[in-house]
Image (cartoon, grey):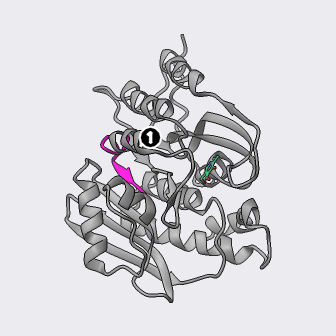
Amino acid sequence: MVPINGSGLTRVALLNDFSCFGKCSLTVSIPIISSYGIETVPLPTAVLSTHGGFKDPVYRDLTDDMLKTAQHWKREGAAFEGICSGYLSSREQIDTVREIFELFTDEHSRPLRLVDPVMGDNGTLYGIFNKETAQSMTRLCEKADILTPNMTEAYCLLHEPFKNGPYDEKELKRVMKALSDFGPKIVILTGAYTDEETIGAACYDREKDETALVLSDRVPGKYHGTGDIFASVLVGRILQGNVPQAAVQAAAAFVAECIRQTPEGADERLGVWLETALPKLRQE
Ligand code: PXL
């Protein structure tokens, strides 16, 4: 057997859904991470006609194929430098991601694990998330190296009521430290802000006990899929060797650029104009 290895490229597995309309999940992470010269290997959790922000999308669940697909890759000798998970719509999918983390971890290989615990936004959890799914998500977060919740997800994981911003730096550090106690070495809070004029992300590195706040001026507009864009730039940069703080800076700047490229009045459900922003990513 010729093993699937030795391409010479850094390789990352992307455990996420394929939503045809509405730029998010795999349709943003593949082009962004590829543009860093990293080989992307998608493992679709589901195929949807649109993401869940449209009415009644057609939804083909692929949970039953997830572990079998990963086991096939393993039999073919594949190894990964990174494994990233995004939107997961059931307990079974979340638990399967944990199994896939283990499957590709042995004495020869320990891929970097990034978990974006996609569960909600603006203080509200998506309809499919309940106590049980949130519990499974907590168990998955324990296995992550890097965790990238927004503030809604962070408070949910901590079983605390959602608090509206602005947030003071002490509160952001408390939340990140508490999440890091679950297991992840790096916790990045997206949508963190300390005043109404700015927006950004906060980053905590447990080993260094260091906190960084990356803030920039608010760009008007709230588009679907920007969390997925943020996580994709982050993983691209980290696998290129950037320290987390620099990766967070690049991710926040690229999300802002994507929003700037999107004309005012564009349908927010369709997401940002990634296509016109993408060339800028390589010019940084
Ligand atoms: O970007 C998050 C996301 C990804 N995939 C699907 C979604 C959502 C958020 O609603 O519905 C299918």
Q: Is 143 part of what is drawn in magenta?
A: yes
Q: Residue at x 39, y 72 (%)?
A: 163
Q: Residue at x 26, y 55 (%)?
A: 180
Rendering coords of residue 176 (x, y %): 29, 63
User: Looking at mark 1, is its residue's CB closer than 8 Å to ligand 1?
Assistant: no
User: Is residue 213 found left or right of 180 in the rendered image?
Assistant: right
| Residue 211 appears in the rendering | no
How many numbered callouts? 1
Q: Residue at x 52, y 36 (%)?
A: 90
Q: Quadrant of the C terminus?
A: bottom right
Name the chief secondary structure element in magenta: loop
Rendering coords of residue 161 (x, y %): 36, 64
Residue neighbourhood size for the residue with mark 1, other residues' Cα within 10 Å, grouped as few (<14), some (14–19), many (≥20): many
Q: Which residues are magenta?
A: 140-150
Q: Quadrant of residue 154?
A: bottom left
Identify the residue at the far top of this view. Answer: 1
User: In this orientation, which residue lies closer to the viewer: 241 or 248?
Assistant: 248
| Residue 206 appears in the rendering | yes
User: Is residue 76 found left or right of 239 in the rendered image?
Assistant: right
User: Is residue 257 found left or right of 184 in the rendered image?
Assistant: right
Q: Residue at x 67, y 70 (%)?
A: 258
Q: Quadrant of the N terminus?
A: top right
Rendering coords of residue 211 (x, y %): 28, 71
User: In this orientation, which residue lies closer to the viewer: 124 or 143?
Assistant: 124
Residue type, label 1: Thr
Q: Which residue is mark 1?
A: 133
Q: Secondary structure at mark 1?
A: helix
User: In this orientation, which residue lies closer to the viewer: 145 or 177?
Assistant: 177
